[in-house]
Image: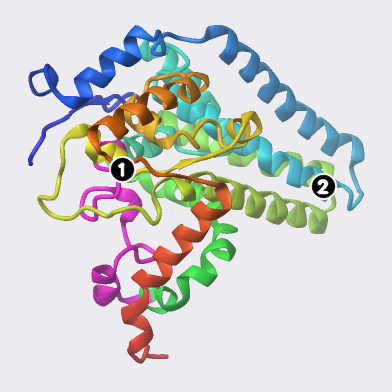
Amino acid sequence: MGESFTIMSRNIMVHPPPSETSGSDFARLSRKIADAGLLGRRPGYYALRITVVAGLYVSGWAAVALIGDSWWTLTVAGFLAVVFGQVALLAHDAAHRQVFRRRRASEVSGRIAGAGIGMGYGWWQDKHTRHHANPNHEELDPDLDPNLLVWSQDQARAAKGLPRLIGRWQAFLFFPLLTLEGFNLHVSSVKALANRSLKHRTLDGTLLFAHFAVYLTVLLWLLPHGMAIAFLAVHQCLFGVYLGSLFAPNHKGMPILKGEDRPDFLRRQVLTSRNVRGGRFTDIALGGLNHQIEHHLFPSMPSPNLRKARTIVRRYCEELGVDYVETGLITSYQQALTSLHQAGAPLRHVRVPA
């Protein structure tokens, strides 16, 4: 069951070794995808998308300056929360080399996007690389660390502190807790700077604190202090909800792997991922992550190609008899919350110390 990976730490490139895939199920699927021309770059698409998102980013802050000392400014905070989410999605695509083929260009663009939202690019990239290598693996996927929530009943039984307290009713608290996800992104980025194994820590730290300085200076310069605090709260809380809502449908509620339970590459990626049905608006809102199965199988595939790849991948999985899960957006959230509620069950049958 064991299968090694080639993981490039500077960019997220997770693929099984050629020696293990020359005649594998994944290799045959990969040839189908390549023959369909879906791995080629989409420079025109990304040039337009980057231009639009950058324009919205600048327009949002210009609106803050123009509206100024008015509570209507808080509507701009909501608008910028969505724009920050779109910038995060661009940083994600750049890290996967979907935008540029060359490592240097991908790294520079990813760091610029990360700096624009106050995210430590090196920290996030390392974390996301490990997630792609072992999605939904209880011991190996950092997204399943029980830092605040518990993701399985085994984690619930071993939980202490906040996870033990929150885990009892975590399904009901999940979306309220997402209001803190934007702040958590910043705090985790800063904490990661103490990790000596993280490459380019000085650069990441400089960009990170430059963002904080400019962000706070602009707010305090343009708005009264009370309104600036309100803007910050609305902006960061809604950004957190949007960010968390982008990733919650992808794996939460899907099978969790443990120990030596590591299927081959194709099944490891497909069986632990969930697609979300929808049209072009869904693609834009979720940044293509609604095609999570295809993204995990081909992480460097440009996001606009994922919808076309879906038809090929789904038909191929049907031929193999591999479960290919696809639901509506609301259903995906329901399944994620149901899974969280079931994971916390052991904690509801014990008395939690005050």
Can residue 138 be found in the magenta stretch?
yes
Q: Is residue 261 left or right of residue 76?
A: left
Find residue 345 and name its label: none
The part of the image, by quadrant, that contains residue 192 is top left
Find residue 323 and name its label: 1
**Which segment did they paint magenta?**
132-161
Q: Is residue 61 left or right of residue 288?
A: right
Q: Residues within 10 Å of mark 2 (few under 14, many from 20)?
A: some
The amino acid on which the numbered mark 2 sits, given as a three-letter code, is: Thr
Sooner in the amino-acid sequence: mark 1 or mark 2: 2
Question: Regarding mark 2 in the picture, which secondary structure is present there?
Answer: helix
Spatial distance from mark 1 to mark 2, Cα to Cα?
43 Å
For disc 2, the marked residue is: 75
Q: Residues within 10 Å of mark 1 (few under 14, many from 20)?
A: few
Q: Name the residue located 32 percent from the left edge and 36 percent from the top edge.
A: 126
Q: Position of residue 42 (x, y in %)?
A: 51, 10
| Residue 299 shows in the view | no
Q: Position of residue 193 (x, y in %)?
A: 37, 42
